[in-house]
Amino acid sequence: MMLDPPRLRRARAEDAATAAPLLVQALDVLALELAGVECLEAAVPLFHELFRLPGNRYSHAHAWVLDGTAGVVGVLLAYPGRDEALLAEATLDWLRARAPGRALVHQPESDPGEFYLDALAVAGSQRGRGLAAVMIDSLCDAARQLGHARVGLLVDDAKPRARALYERLGFVADGRREVAGHAYAHMTRVLPARTD
């Protein structure tokens, strides 16, 4: 029996139970900083709540999920780079309201002229199957259909395998960023022009 291949679709608020742990995994140290906790598992409830809410950077409104035979097996967050500061500030305002006195500062990651891939994760049981590449290529197609000329992302200097994947998929390093005390390469992929 032939199984349907996984497909990328826009996320819904009810995907939070499976998407939030994957987002926390992808965000890693940034999730710890934003949640004000010391272990990733402790950050999941906060990101579960953010994912369900509209109007913030980690909302389902900016997410796509990869549906497989085992349910949601991957998640990515992406939005126009020009929207990053507004989304980030809304998120930080929400976090400050929950924990007054916390000093949270937005550190820019994207460029205004790109469609920004903020986070990407594939479930551990599904890794090594090329699903991240499928998700990225599908996102690039969606970004092109939305009229974007390029997709940008950050890759942690401590993750050379991730950088190698992005390079195989056509991303080129074009700058540096520091976020939450970690060094990242900013990479972009130029998209073919729309012909319709």
Image: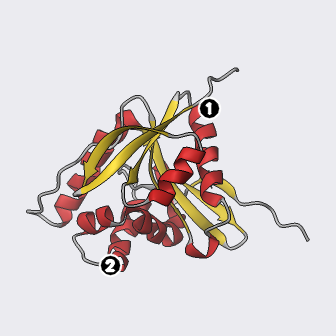
The percent position of residue 172, horizontal first and vertical second, equals 48, 38
What is the number of callouts on the image?
2
Q: Label 2, on which residue?
A: 42
Camera-nearest residue between 119 and 187? 187
Residue at 38%, 62% in the rendered image: 27
> Tag 2's secondary structure?
helix
Q: Assess whether mark 2 and mark 1 are in contact (beta carbons under 8 angstroms).
A: no
Q: Nearer the viewer, residue 89 or 41?
A: 41
Residue at mark 1: 145
N-term mark: 1 or 2: 2
Q: Residue at x 69, y 20 (%)?
A: 195
Q: Quadrant of the C terminus?
A: top right
Secondary structure of the residue carrying tag 1 is helix
For the N terminus, give its image quadrant.
Answer: bottom right
The structure residue drawn at horizontal position 77% and vertical position 60%, both measured from the top left corner, is 5
**Left or right relative to 111: residue 166:** right
Q: What is the three-letter code of the residue carrying label 2?
A: Ala
Which residue is at 17% across, 51% downward? 105
Residue 102 pos. (x, y %): 12, 62
Viewer-proximal residue, 30 or 19?
Answer: 30
